[in-house]
Image (cartoon, rainbow, N blue to C red):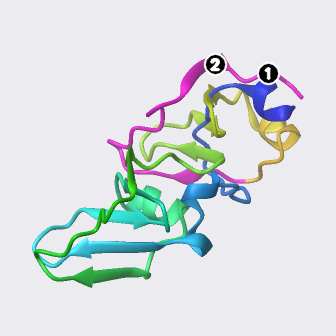
Amino acid sequence: MLLKIIGLPLLIAATLSVALPSFAHADDGSFYRRSIAPQVYFLTENEICRVVGPGQLDALGGTGRVQVVGPAAELGGGRTDRGACPWPTGFYRYPDKPQVYYINEYDICRVVGEGQMRALGGRRAQVVGANADLAHDKTDGGACRWP
């Protein structure tokens, strides 16, 4: 499968169609934050994860969809806590760097040029915050393999 061949996520300045793990699909859950804190959470019926920043919120489809709840609202409610939300499959890059990364459900890898990005199905990479942890919970695959 392409996901296992490619490896690590790549930062790319283009947005690819986003394929999220089942627990992290915006259509299957909701975004919340408490009125006293900026931290946003993504909740599904059975799981909860912490959105790591505005770039990830946008990548997850949550921009403009965050519901603000009371300061003492219980968001977990028996859900499995996944920690930081995983990044959706796609291409990403940091604002001050040209390097693009490809991320899939398991891995992150460095895209080697626009030709490789196109071969992997990308057109543009999404720019993320300078402190975004794209490699969170991923295996570093080094340079992406050609499909």
Q: What residue lies at 46% left-to-right and 43% top-to-bottom?
A: 94
SS assignment for the magenta stretch, majority: loop
Q: Quadrant of residue 100?
A: top right
Mark count: 2
Q: Is residue 142 magenta?
A: yes
Q: Nearer the viewer, residue 44 or 16?
A: 44
* Residue beneath the point at 60% across and 49% down: 13
Range shown magenta: 124-147
Look at mark 2 in the image and give the residue it sits on: 141
Task: State whether residue 50 is above or below residue 86.
Answer: below
| Residue under pointer 1 | 145
On screen, residue 133 versus residue 59, left or right, reads left
Decide if residue 49 is on the left or right side of residue 142: left
- The quadrant of the image that shows the C terminus is top right
Looking at the image, which is closer to me, 16 or 27? 27
The local secondary structure at tag 2 comes to strand
Q: Residue 99: percent from the left, percent from the top? A: 57, 33
15 in the magenta segment: no
Percent position of residue 77, x then y: 31, 66
Look at the picture and state if 85 lies above or below 136.
below
Three-letter amino acid code at disc 2?
Answer: Gly
